[in-house]
Image (cartoon, grey):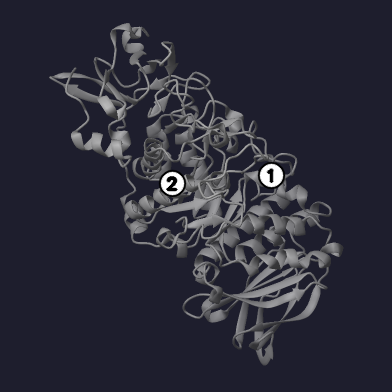
Amino acid sequence: MSESIFTDVDLYLISEGRHEQLWQVLGAHVREVDGTTGVNFAVWAPNALAVRIMGDFNGWNSEHHAMGSLGRSGIWELFVPGATPGQYYKYDIQTRDGHWKTNADPMAFATELPPANASRIYESSYHWNDSTWLTHRAQTNPHVQPTSVYEVHIGSWKPGLGYRQLATELVNYVVDLGYTHVEFMPVAEHPYAPSWGYQVTSYYAPSSRFGEPDDFRFLVDALHQADIGVIVDWVPAHFPKDAWALARFDGTALYEHEDPHRGEHPDWGTYVFNFGRKEVRNFLTANALYWLKEYHIDALRVDAVSSMLYLDYSREEGQWTPNEFGGREYLEAVSFLQEVNAMVYAQVPGAMMIAEESTAWGGVTAPTNVGGLGFGMKWNMGWMHDSLEYMKEEPIHRRYHHGTMTFSLVYAWSENYVLPLSHDEVVHGKGSLYARMPGDHWQKLANLRAYLAFMWAHPGKKLLFMGGDFGQQVEWNAGQSLDWHLVEQEESHRGIQATVRAMNSIYKSHPALWERDNEPGGFQWLIVDGSEDNVFAWLRWDHNGQSLVSVTNMSPVVRHDYRLGVPCTGEWIEVLNTDRAEFGGSDVQNGSVPGYEGSVQGQPAHISVTLAPLATSWFVLKTER
């Protein structure tokens, strides 16, 4: 066999489960051996009796391309002269019982267009142009920056667009509306499009549905050059049972846990990774670094963390086995999450790890050195659920549900939160955000505008799924386009867009709205008990002592001469009012109002304002504008 691509150090690190650049040795790599150019193939299959390779380079006949075993490492390797980028390949694996099975490469960098499933030899030739972005990111603490995220499902944003087309159309749209980040639902290759990408079969390959891997790099680069961060959904919790992919890869439970109580999700029909196996942990931790380093991704949003933390997650009695201490916590998964989070924060300055975690598990965003999971942020599912429950009520009934809107401020600083209005809230019969608002068309839009501005002023980073920013009327369908005609035909839906555009602009320019999201001192209630009026009001503070007043009137009644406490006298400017005519409202505005001496709501001064119906207003001192 030709000289191996693996050094002794590589093999040692792999044996320890600590090869952080695993993708540089496993998979298919173009190289030159003894003056001959070809491709080096390497795959981990420790329980195979033999491994062969077939592809375009040998007429899909593997008999003459047997791979060599690298001993106890479990790795099989072969250099194939003449193999070239663009060719497809698969592995033939002989299992312990003597049968042969054909598999895609777990470390493939590109794939055949689904539903076909061959792996593809790929060598990147992309030259990045985002050094300014990366330098700034490395010098910045992302948790104290403005974060307004636009969540996108690539296939249904505007169907037919590939990565390179999105680099123009999506980038222009996101810049126009003023978001700071885009979050892509999973881009790793998956065979079944209706899974939305959450059933991954090729963890190291961007989906071929939208172009080449370098095309995806081009999209990320374009976003960075437009000063937009990129978040990608990452799915280390489970994988599908397709026989050609990771499932029973070498004829044994290799990537999945052998015990079905730990190795299968009964609800999802998928396998669960064996988080206690060092090689599997290495596969996943290296994968996280791969996306951050090779594709310059700024953050990974880790899907279904709750399902990883609990052995009894979505399982009935008798379907799960307690841990060694008799508890329900999946200790190996906890350790894995701590490991990958610590590794990312140590190796990729300025990157973020974000948890989709829906339980009361403590310390999700606490550092690993004090026993936390080590995430930078966590989705606030409680806020999402409670606030949507409140918003669906008719205004006349909202007084009885006032506490559901204020409860989130009881625990708002227990973790570093993202407020998510994600794709999960507009599917499976839940209806769109627009549809969940009560009232006629005008009231639905007014409610939505007021709600979004309430959200943008609430402590925590922001996430809004596509369509919510123009009032999509029907729930999301991944098989068809968003209803862009609403924006083209109806001024009222353009008004939602205009509201989001204005909010994002004001949000980014006022540190009081984001700088102290994770500090109780950055927030102060003015009106917490306004249930009779359906009114909520508070102050947000930045580190320089500058403030912003947010007041929301969730009733359809105009309220005159409403007094709000402010920290000082002077002229207070209404910088946002969701009832403005340009947003589709009734145009009940305040403009500027004077601050009067006299204590109100614990503040030394106050302003008297008119509260527009079903609207949120923000006020700042004129010198702070």
Residue 336 is tagged as 2
Q: Secondary structure at mark 2?
A: helix
- Residue at 21% over, 38% down: 9
* Picture quadrant where residue 214 is located: top left
Residue 503 is tagged as none
* Picture quadrant where residue 21 is located: top left
Return the residue found at the far front: 325
Please state which of residues 565 and 22 is positioned toward the viewer in this rendering: 22
Q: Please tell me how crowded label 1 is: few (under 14), some (14-19), or many (20+) other residues with Cα within 10 Å.
A: many
- Residue at 74% over, 44% down: 430
* 9 to 441, vertically: above or below: above
Question: Label 1 amino acid?
Answer: Val
Residue 225, given in percent of the width and then of the height, sits at: 39, 49
* 3 to 147, vertically: above or below: above
Whether residue 127 can be seen here: no
Return the residue found at the far bottom: 597
Q: Can you say which quadrant of the picture contains the N terminus?
A: top left
Whether residue 88 can be seen here: yes
Return the residue found at the far right: 396
- Relative horizontal placement of residue 195, taking residue 70 as reference (left or right): right
**Cα distance in 3D space between marks 1 and 2:** 31 Å
Residue behind mark 1: 426
* Lower position in the chain sequence, tag 1 or tag 2: 2
Question: Label 2 amino acid?
Answer: Phe
Residue 256, given in percent of the width and then of the height, sits at: 48, 32
- Relative horizontal placement of residue 170, taking residue 595 as reference (left or right): left
Q: Can you say which quadrant of the picture contains the C terminus?
A: bottom right
- Residue at 71% over, 62% down: 450
Q: Please tell me how crowded label 2 is: few (under 14), some (14-19), or many (20+) other residues with Cα within 10 Å.
A: many
Residue 93, given in percent of the width and then of the height, sits at: 39, 16
* Picture quadrant where residue 72 is located: top left
Mark in front: 1 vs 2:
2
